Image (cartoon, rainbow, N blue to C red):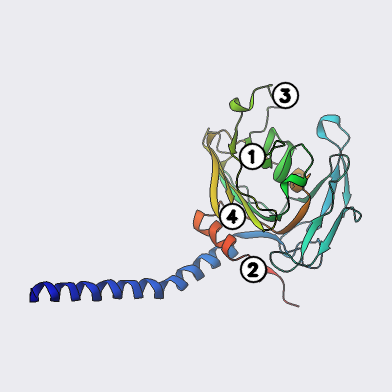
Amino acid sequence: MVARRIARSIAGCLIASIAMSASAEEPVDRSDAASEVLQSAQFYSSFDTTTTADYGQGDLRLWTRYGQPARGNIVEKLGIDEKRVRLVTGGVQGGAIELIEQLPDDGFLFYRAAGKLAPRDKGWGGTVSLWLKGNLADLNKHYCDPIMVVQNRYNNGAVWCDFTPEQPRDLRLGLFSKLPEGKTAPELPESQQPIVRAKAPSFSPDAWHHLALTWDHFDTGRADGTATLYLDGRPITSIKNQPADMHWQLDRVRMFLGSAFVGLLDEMATFDRPLTPAQVALLHSEPELLSKLKKKP
């Protein structure tokens, strides 16, 4: 009996010691993860006082695109439609950008991708992160694209996510290789396209929600491309073993945000690699993290 009591006492001490050690190490691990996220950042727009991004290379100004590639009537204008888009206080961190109503003529807000993505020979990856707040029931009955990175069209060298028109809305993820010159995408049902759905994810109109879209193995020449969509720090759907030969000319690539969305957007960022699930979860739990990228006055 005495031996058993001594053994239990030793075991209890060991468990307590391990727990204390883990607790003591947790802040260090978290700090390291935060440092890795910040080091991987290539672009960051806080929307605190301006639509011009706080951090990155190349053109950091926000643009608006009107028209459709299929119609050949694309017009790009510097800045925003101030009747429908404005800066406001009360973001998930600092200020935010508000889309008061849907932009006319298939309008998209976008940043130019040059200097904000990191293509590499023999395969590469990346991440786009964005916060949203809005009532999906208020959106018009068509697709709404929170994030799209594209040179041509959604089905021709693009990675994107969208909310579907029906209620309750699904959240889709798409990954399309660039089509050979002169080729058009075949008319196929969604089930035969590189599109996956997260069925009716929880999206409260009164809360901020974090979206992150990661990808890897682009431009390898093999059918090994991947993309994963995260909502509020958790992976909700992914595409694997997909050809992802983009061959993007970055001066022609656009990073669209909030197409057909009505509500608030905040803290947009890109990273030079696919962030890990733990790092995406960190972005969700600490929305103030990226503000460290802002230049000090």
Q: Nearer the viewer, residue 190 or 216?
A: 190
- Picture layout, residue 135 above or below residue 183: below
Mark 4 neighbour density, 10 Å: few (under 14) some (14–19) many (20 or more): some
Residue behind mark 3: 184
Label 2 or label 1, whichever comes before in sequence order:
1
Label 4 or label 1, whichever comes before in sequence order:
1
Mark 3 neighbour density, 10 Å: few (under 14) some (14–19) many (20 or more): few
In the rendered image, which quarter is residue 48 located in? bottom right
Q: Name the spot of residue 181 as percent of width and height, x first.
A: 72, 27
Residue behind mark 2: 288
Residue 220 visible here: yes
- Picture layout, residue 271 above or below residue 121: below
Regarding mark 2 in the picture, which secondary structure is present there? loop
Regarding mark 3 in the picture, which secondary structure is present there? loop
Residue behind mark 4: 232
Q: Are marks 4 and 1 in contact (CB under 8 Å)?
A: no
Regarding mark 1 in the picture, which secondary structure is present there? loop
Residue drawn at the location 72% of the way across and 46% of the way down: 136
